[in-house]
Image (spheres, rainbow, N blue to C red):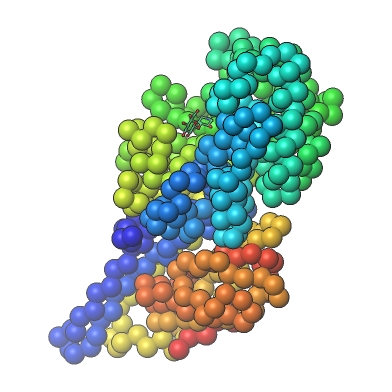
Amino acid sequence: MRRSRAILTVLTAAAVTAGGFLTLTQAANAATTLGSAAAAKSRYFGTAVAAYKLTDSVYTGLLDTQFTMVTPENEMKWDATEPSQNTFSYTSADTIVARAKANGQRVRGHALAWHSQQPSWVASLSGTALRSAMVNHITNVATHYKGQLYAWDVVNEAFSDNGDGSRRSSNLQATGNDWIEVAFQTARAADPSAKLCYNDYNTDGVNAKSTAVYTMVKDFLARGVPIDCVGFQSHFNSASPLPSDYQANLQRFADLGVEVQITELDIAGSGTAQADSYSKVVAACLAVSKCTGISVWGIRDSDSWRASDTPLLFDASGNPKEAYNAVITAFGGTTTTSSPTTSSSPTTGTGACTATVANNSWTGGFVTTVTVKAGATAITSWKVALTLPTGSAVTSTWSATASGSSGALTFTNASYNGSLAAGASTSFGFQGTGTAFSGTPTCTVS
Ligand code: 9MR
């Protein structure tokens, strides 16, 4: 994959001046990733993943380096996991989960009960037979993934778009208004460790539909029906743009005591307008402390369910778009631009450096972002040494080269971020399984 200007701006110009001295001018922006930028703000950054694309190396390259959360796009839906009654099929979903686990990524399960993508046998059921089939389905699938998921979308899209706050009419709704709470109770019984979410679209701003969801969540909490989070799909286009009260809407749900998650983000468009909307989504999530993360609904535009809208962060070739850069920047990124420095002799890099770590950890994994800072003298290379806790292993590294994957490790600067002006900093990161390193690493220059 070509490194794009969008990720990294490196300008190095060296010239011998009339007086015979070397003039070195360098401005470097540290590269970072969606996952590490979000992790620095204690958020995850995820994507929908399609199992059949896992043989595409451009796709997996981006998946492995950019994202810290994974949602199977279709593989955990009812039609995929229970194609005929009481016969369960988990192969594709298991592949995604195992791969995510091996890469230290977490998984959002999607979706246990939904009016859409039901297997055909469900259509012939109604009443108590359908209700029992739903309970059996949730029990089996949630038990299969017990302890392995960060969250489950337990119920998806159960409210109508009529503008009157009513429930969507569906075969599940026809089994009785309590089908949603039964679904949540069943999921909790099967997997007590997964956060249980209600997920929907067109609930992103304050409107009749989101207010109906809000009222349901409030009622569930008051009556002790288990619910931990609300997912806001956030599929935006010109007909359904990012609402101006997006943050206020997230906040009112958070104020009920549930987590809020942006679960299926995509924004039709291109260029600066698209990038600005993405920035606003990130800013809204950062402003709401219970907003724990953002997932986009696919990696490249060509992976999108609505590819012609080019709604994602990477183009069809896998190059980062303006919106990608905007997301990193909105997270506060770790982009450091040192002003060009001119010296009358070659920069030799004899100064000292320091390194500090910031971790985003979860059970079984972590993302560590290391900030390397030059001391009072400019430097041209750096090495950071740290020892990972026993049993921990690095699964991927960005913006540095690691000496190995476990135990005592050194990370050497990449070609583009070794030179730092006096006092300037850059960052690199790594993701791993096990427990993160939490001390102060040693930084040396050579
Ligand atoms: O992206 C999914 C697409 O591949 C499927 O064909 C489609 C079928 O309904 O579902 C898409 O994902 C949907 C998600 O599961 C729920 N919210 C809306 C998403 C986009 O349609």
* 280, above or below 22, in the image: above
* 365, above or below 187, in the image: below
Quadrant location of residue 92? top right
Check the image and name the residue furthest to the left: 18
Question: Of residues 99 and 313, which is closer to you in this image?
Answer: 99
Residue 158 rendering spot, x and y as whole percentages: 63, 21
Residue drawn at (45%, 42%) of the image: 298
Quadrant location of residue 99? bottom right
The quarter of the picture where the N terminus appears is bottom left
The tally of labels here is: 0
Check the image and name the residue furthest to the right: 223
Q: Is residue 77 visible?
A: no
Residue drawn at (83%, 25%) of the image: 222
Residue 206 rendering spot, x and y as whole percentages: 59, 22
Residue 127 rendering spot, x and y as whole percentages: 73, 13
Left or right: residue 76 versus residue 343 is right
* 387, above or below 321, in the image: below
Residue drawn at (48%, 39%) of the image: 297
Residue drawn at (55%, 10%) of the image: 162
Left or right: residue 226 versus residue 97 is right
The quarter of the picture where the C terminus appears is bottom left
Q: Is residue 394 visible?
A: yes
Residue 17 rendering spot, x and y as whole percentages: 18, 84
